[in-house]
Image (tube, rainbow, N blue to C red):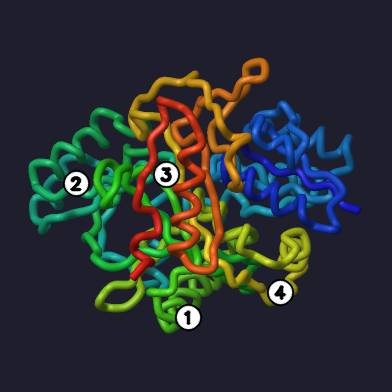
Amino acid sequence: MKKVLVIGSGGREHAICYKFKQSPQVEEVFVAPGNPGMSDVATLVPLQTNDFEELIEFVKENEIDLTFVGPEIPLCAGITDAFHEAGLEIFGPTKAAAELEGSKVFSKAMMKKYNIPTAKYESFDNFEDAKAYLLRQEMPIVLKADGLAAGKGVIIATTMEEACASLEEMMCNQLFDQAGSSVVIEEFLEGEEFSLLAFVNGNLVVPMQIAQDHKRAFDHDEGLNTGGMGAYTPVHHIPESAYNDAVEKIVQAMADAMVLEGKPFLGILYGGCMLTKDGVKTIEYNVRFGDPETEVVLPALQNDLFEVVSNTMKGIPTKLEWSNEHFCGVVMANKGYPESYKKGAIIEGLDQCDATVFHMGTSSEGNQLIATGGRVLFVLKSGATLKDAQDCVYEEIKKIKCDSLFYRHDIGNKGIK
């Protein structure tokens, strides 16, 4: 029997722990640092994701067989390299390979070099040069901070005035701290977005069922971009031909490219894809499970997650099996998110809620559950159809009582015809 340590503390990590816990091969799941909502599926370890030495010591002392990294920040900081130096098994890309997410400039340069379909772009680290280029472009336009910005470093500007103001905020006023000191300016693509995740080891790519995320804060795709306000899977209105193209031209192509660059990728490779009138295009790459896509994709996966990860690490392909059910999940977030919000509201009614609830940003005070994150809870239901799953999840959300939380009411609508 195996022991697994999951690194991270959000809804994505809760879903990963939930899936590992179901494995007949896994004796115990630990999570560092985790959150109180995960205690039903994992033992919480009070260590931070950036405390590599302490994490390595814990793994050695507790004879952990596999460490699985959830968030991007420790990956981009080199947690995998530190574990490898200590001779420990860890599932996640090296610091060099994690640059695919850590630097938008690097990622776009890789796409250009290896002819991976994406939006036309230019990158800049000088404001005056960036503004001069911007003034020659058509609107709308997309501005992306080069570095990590928790899923919020993208601005879609619809007017030149807005674009110039946003560029100045990013490059001169540190809207996204140092992440925006360099920027990518790219053409605005129109089409249907979808998320394609895959287990990857070098040239081996094991693609998962696609999901559709909802980035904007409010109904009808209004408001600011967020880390994601809900997701559903499967996505039937994306044709199989587009899925196959995305696997071949976006995920497999980048996995092969990273091998050629001497930075072979091991871990979860996420392709943010768009089906345009000109075929599939790459919006971005992430180097870990997406959040909130993980919270719908892993519950739909019928395979033993430990076995899939173990096989991938050995270079053995796995045939993935998927539920016939549809999965729809909705994020409950603190009012004000993705900008400033208050922490500390009490959450009640979870014991009345007949849904799978993944905790994204909660803590406990005594026996009370407290909302502490921007995104707080992810409420998930499945059904024979997407409409069934959607109806069920919104019925269950009503039972959760917390005045400071809000959520979108249209998660899944794009997939319901």
Tell me which numbered mark, 2 or 1, is placed earlier along the sequence. 2
Tell me which numbered mark, 3 or 2, is placed earlier along the sequence. 2
**Residue under pointer 3:** 227
CA gap, disc 3 and disc 1 = 26 Å
**Residue under pointer 1:** 244
Q: Secondary structure at mark 4?
A: loop
On residue 130, which mark appears? 2
Residue at the spot 88% in from the left edge and 35% down from the top edge? 61
CA gap, disc 3 and disc 2 = 26 Å
Tell me which numbered mark, 4 or 1, is placed earlier along the sequence. 1
**Residue under pointer 4:** 318
Q: Give, as a three-letter code, the residue at label 1.
A: Asn
CA gap, disc 2 and disc 1 = 36 Å
CA gap, disc 4 and disc 1 = 17 Å
Res 213 quadrant in image: bottom left
On residue 277, which mark appears? none
Question: Percent position (x, y) of residue 202?
Answer: 63, 68
Q: Give, as a three-letter code, the residue at label 4.
A: Thr
Q: Secondary structure at mark 2?
A: helix
